[in-house]
Amino acid sequence: MLRSGCLHGNHLTTPYAAMADEGMMLDSGMLALKLTLVPLFLLVVSMSGKWWGPSVAGWLAGLPVVAGPILFILVLTHGPGFGARAATLSLSAILASEAFNFAYAWTCRSHAWSVALAIALVTWFIAACGLSMLPTSPLWAATVAFAAVCFGQSFLPRSSTSGAGAPLTRSELIGRMIAGAVLTLSVTYVSGWVGAAWSGLLAVFPLLGIVLSVSSHRAHGPSFVISLLRGMVLGRFSFAAFCLLLSFSLPYQRPLLAFAEASVLAMFVQWGTWRLATTQRAKISEPGTIAAD
């Protein structure tokens, strides 16, 4: 009987060996995505704070720069259905992220960064546990996210700090990028165990909020942090649009096309919110200018 396969030197090439090679290449490519996508996005957001100040950095941090790549990897690993449910939970997790920001912003005014961080993390975990027990519905998730954004915009403390921050050291930048890679690896590793709900919630774990808030608090003080966190509220709308579109489109479209459409929508919404905020600031400053004249 002939064996399916042929000898090349000392190696036996079979269909099973070819499939194994393809699987190894896919795993290698997936690992490369996990180790590069989120850290590179974190680098861009971190440098924006140095160039343009905390408000712009917070606004950019509202984009799905961390959760987007993680959700994409979850879809590649577990399929579109899993990814759609995780995207729905990521949308509702805006509430937990705003809870973190709210707790940190108010606590940092009178306490050290370590105390503010501990209280904010406990607040996030309580909110995330509550969200994990609620029904998975895009409409419900959108309602929760919208209410959280409105609450954050209304009740976060205010700050007039808008200038660019001090230059970041190389070790700080590397530390932020390593934290992004660790979060990506952790979420995608435990996703099969914790399920789509907690995978979606953990994809929106406030990594950016932690690294940006703590480093800014230590370097520039509470006012800078508050301005940064208020900028994040403005960026939530684009993240919400991104997750909402994914929750509807992933079951019916190819993942790459669904994520491309969601990314375009997120950038359009982000541009719109920035234009709206700029117009409002201009209107607010007009009376002062007229009075001065």
Image (tube, rainbow, N blue to C red):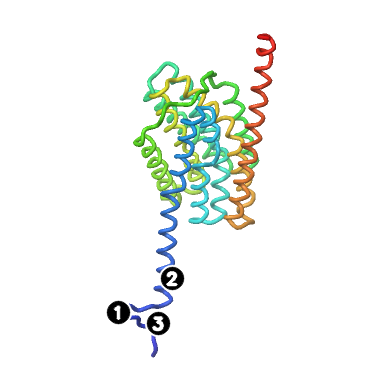
Mark 1 or 2 closer to N-term? Answer: 1
Secondary structure of residue under mark 1: loop
Q: Are marks 1 and 3 in contact (CB under 8 Å)?
A: no
Mark 2 or 3 closer to N-term? Answer: 3
Tag 1 residue? 10
Mark toward the viewer: 1 or 2: 1
Is residue 271 toward the left or the right of residue 207 in the image?
right
Tag 2 residue? 19
Is residue 51 toward the left or the right of residue 186 in the image?
right
Q: Hey, what amino acid is under mark 2?
A: Met
User: Residue 19: horizontal and vertical position, in percent?
Assistant: 43, 70
The residue depicted at 60 percent of the width and 51 percent of the height is 260
Tag 3 residue? 5
Mark 1 burial class by Cα count in 10 Å: few <14, some 14-19, many 20+: few
Q: Are marks 1 and 2 in contact (CB under 8 Å)?
A: no
User: Residue 269: horizontal and vertical position, in percent?
Assistant: 64, 38
The residue depicted at 65 percent of the width and 40 percent of the height is 268
User: Residue 103: horizontal and vertical position, in percent?
Assistant: 48, 24
